Amino acid sequence: MGIGDMELESNKDHDDVGAPDTAHQISSDSWLQVAFVLTTGINSAYVLGYSGTVMVPLGWIGGVVGLVVATMISLYANALIAYLHEYGGQRHIRYRDLAGFIYGKKVYSLTWALQYINLFMINTGFIILAGSALKAAYVLFRDDGMLKLPYCIIIAGIMCAIFAISIPHLSALGIWLAISTVFSLVYIIVAFALSVKDGLQLPPRDYNIPGEGMGKVFTTIGASANLVFAYNTGMLPEIQATIRQPVVKNMMKALYFQFTVGVLPMYLVTFTGYWAYGSSTEVYLLNSVHGPVWVKALANISAFLQSVISLHIFASPMYEYLDTRFGVKGSALNVKNLSSRIGLRGGYLTINTFVAAFLPFLGDFMSLTGAISTFPLTFILANHMYLVAKKEKLSGSQKCWHWLNICFFSLLSLAATISAIRLIAVDSKEYHLFADL
């Protein structure tokens, strides 16, 4: 079933559709602001890892085809969720609300658990990423081993907590989205320019996929999870909740922007990085490039600061739950609200930071997150929810199409989970816990 077919079913406004209570703002943002929220997610500092975690294990053909196909299927899967936002005559501003409305209480709880795991892993990855960027900037000036990665991760966690306490909700990001875009452009342009310079000067590169036997197979399967991780948030209803009416029409505008203009910078830096360094590309691309120290430092600091902003986006469903549960509303500077956010958000990020320092294997986190939660939330659940919600309107071939997606991504999710767990086990033996990578 194509996106055009879905648009025919959802071509009217629903200004009278109600929404559940929440401590955060809803229906306040333009489609363009939401588009920048989505694009910030795609072009977060994680893009500096895709040359190493996607292209190296998959090679030119698998990597390029995989990223393009993942773009198309991710747009389709997100569109399925977007068109269910007002299903049944009410707005579903949380992923678990939508699943609970369609399936009932048990699936509500299961979806909340999957989403919590997904966002917790993404947030942990952002702290690892921010800490890695901070350490990379430090060693440019003093490679004395004094500032180790676990210390950088702790600093990153503290910065993320300060930002989280200061920004009450997703819609309040405002100007920070523009600042985040500037930071993204800095490290993407620097990584691209230095990669091109190196690529023109270096001898011919080896583009053979590394590894052999079953190890190579597991690595390739794990890279498939990184493909979907690159595009999907697992929190589309929460982002769609902030958009103005008509919410479906405006959300589709934001998604089209995300999956056209928004993916171009990610493509640029991913393909250029792999072209320049081949199978020796580092997991964090800025560790591969050569150039002026101040330029590399600027890119690393930009990646550090952008990660702080991006984490806030992906932690917002947890913040919304905590604020709504404990009645934290209003100004971020209100003494009661400030103390509540320090305790609630600070406590959550403390756990994230500890896990990040304990297992600082960024590529493995990307694989595991994609496998155990992004696949089920974005592809399996999305297709099945649409199948259940629209079953009376779907033809036999359309139903078969959705079941094919459900079965395929279920098998891929299982295989990718096994692969990711194996990778973490191997890395844990090689590097030890609280490793200074």
Image (tube, rainbow, N blue to C red):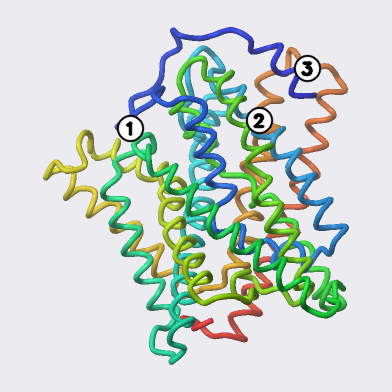
Q: Quick one: 119 or 152, which is closer to the camera?
A: 152
Numbered disc 2: secondary structure: helix
Answer above or below: position of 305 versus 254: below
Residue 176 appears in which quarter of the rendering? Answer: top left
Tell me if label 3 and label 2 are in contact, CB under 8 Å.
no
Note whether residue 105 is visible.
no
Note whether residue 293 is visible.
yes
Q: Quick one: 429 or 266, which is closer to the camera?
A: 266
At a point 75% along the width and 45% down the height, the residue shown is 70
Q: Amino acid at mark 2?
A: Tyr
Residue 54 appears in which quarter of the rendering? Answer: bottom right
Real-space CA distance between mark 2 and mark 1, rounded to the nearest whole angstrom: 26 Å
Tell me if label 2 and label 1 are in contact, CB under 8 Å.
no
Real-space CA distance between mark 3 and mark 1, rounded to the nearest whole angstrom: 36 Å
- On residue 394, the disc is 3
Q: Which residue is mark 1?
A: 24
Mark 2 surroundings within 10 Å by alpha-carbon count, few (fewer than 14), some (14 through 19), many (20 or more)? some
Q: Which residue is mark 2?
A: 256
Q: Amino acid at mark 3?
A: Leu
Real-space CA distance between mark 3 and mark 2, rounded to the nearest whole angstrom: 24 Å
At a point 46% along the width and 57% down the height, the residue shown is 307
Residue ranking furthest to the bottom: 144
* Image quarter hosting the C terminus: bottom right
Q: In x, y percent, where is residue 204?
A: 86, 77
Numbered disc 3: secondary structure: loop
Q: Amino acid at mark 1?
A: His
